[in-house]
Image (tube, helix red, strand yellow):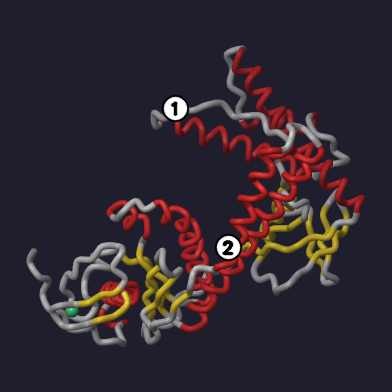
Amino acid sequence: MLSYKLRLYPTKTQESRLDNAIDSCRMLYNDFIFESRLAYKEGYKLNFDELQRMLPYMIPKDKVYSKAAQMVLWQFYNNLKVLSSLSKKGKRIGKLRFKPKSRYNSINYNQSGFKLLPDNTIKLSKIGKIKCVIHRKIQGKIKEIIVKKELTEDWYAIVVCENEIKSICSLFRKKIVGIDVGINNFAYDSDGHVIKHPQFLRKSEKKMKRAQRKLSKKVKNSGSKWKQKLNLDIIHQKIKNQRNDFLHKASRYYVDNFDTIFVEDLKIQNMIKNRHLAKSIFDSSWNSFFQKLEYKAANAGILFAKVVPHGTSQSCSNCGRMVKKTLAIRTHCCSYCGLVIDRDYNASLNIKQSGIDSLPTGCREVTPLERAPLAVI
Ligand SMILES: [Zn+2]
């Protein structure tokens, strides 16, 4: 599944129709909670079919497309299932909570009720033809469209498509890259290419902190507090957009320039390595970077794989021996073979090598480096 996010430009009337439809869905969701609780009090559990039968009497049919209302039921029922499976596992669980307006901001058109038109509009049942920017070719069969209102009050359509993933074209790997992500640089690859941490994020983060401080000083429930909240939401949104843009471009670079991409599996790395605070801030970015690499690679028919970290930053990429260093030491100086290179560069070379080692022998274009046995410690 691949999704495209398109900006929508509804008219005032369409906007109020969308607002109404979303709010009706929200109330429907809350009604489901209410009905289930009521039944539960009488010692009875409502099942899916019973809720389904109640559905037509619970929604204003002129406002909400019927399939979209069904999706609300589906979502509600799924949430219930998740809770009950958690409780079966022995986890402590709470109740499903009623959703306030601020926590419900989308409507889901599944399978039907929508149409993408060539004149840059999307036709939605019960809403009308909404102007939108189709900034790229939509590929694959459209499965659903989720219309979402961001905190900044901008509207988006998330178009979810089903795509057949291309099988990896050739087994013969030529352009192989290993990427090391880190705190000092966002990424350092085995080609010596460095992607620095984007500075604009730091700038926006400063702005955000200032806005947060301002907000905390405003009087509760006042108009100016509400205004400041919107200000803060706009900054949040901007940071989100900037980060996404950066990650899309960075991942695109690798998919366009290589046919095999190796990164280090961070989950495992985090468990065994340090618990630096700064890291957790970047973690989400890295994970999102890997996700983007993964689907872009799958789409382009190239190989993307995570390798198990194994002394990635400590061992020497030239002779394979362990060269112990703390986080503060930025240069890898091997006293055995005399190799002196950037610490992250050394790590990326190791990632590339362990990626190559994991490939079936027939696929290796690059002859593996000759390695000396590991020093016994
Ligand atoms: Zn060495």
The quarter of the displayed image where residue 188 is located: bottom left
**Depicted 131 relative to depicted 173: above or below:** above
**Depicted 370 relative to depicted 204: above or below:** below
Q: Residue at x 46, y 62 (%)?
A: 286
User: Which residue occupies the extreme top position in the image?
Assistant: 42
Q: Name the residue carrying label 2.
A: 201
Q: Name the residue carrying label 1.
A: 92
Instruction: Say left or right for 241 vs 374.
Output: right
Q: CA distance from mark 1 to mark 2?
A: 37 Å
Amino acid under disc 2: Leu
Near mark 1 (Cα within 10 A), the count class, few <14, some 14-19 or many ≥20, is few
Which quadrant is the C terminus positioned in?
bottom left
In front here: 8 or 37?
Answer: 8
In front here: 71 or 232?
Answer: 232
Residue 359 visible in the snapshot: no
Q: Residue at x 71, y 56 (%)?
A: 145
**Depicted 115 relative to depicted 127: above or below:** below
- Rendering coords of residue 36 (x, y %): 64, 23
User: Which residue occupies the extreme right position in the image?
Assistant: 13
**Element class at badge 1:** loop
Residue 347 visible in the snapshot: yes
Amino acid under disc 1: Arg
Instruction: Say left or right for 76 vs 196.
Output: right
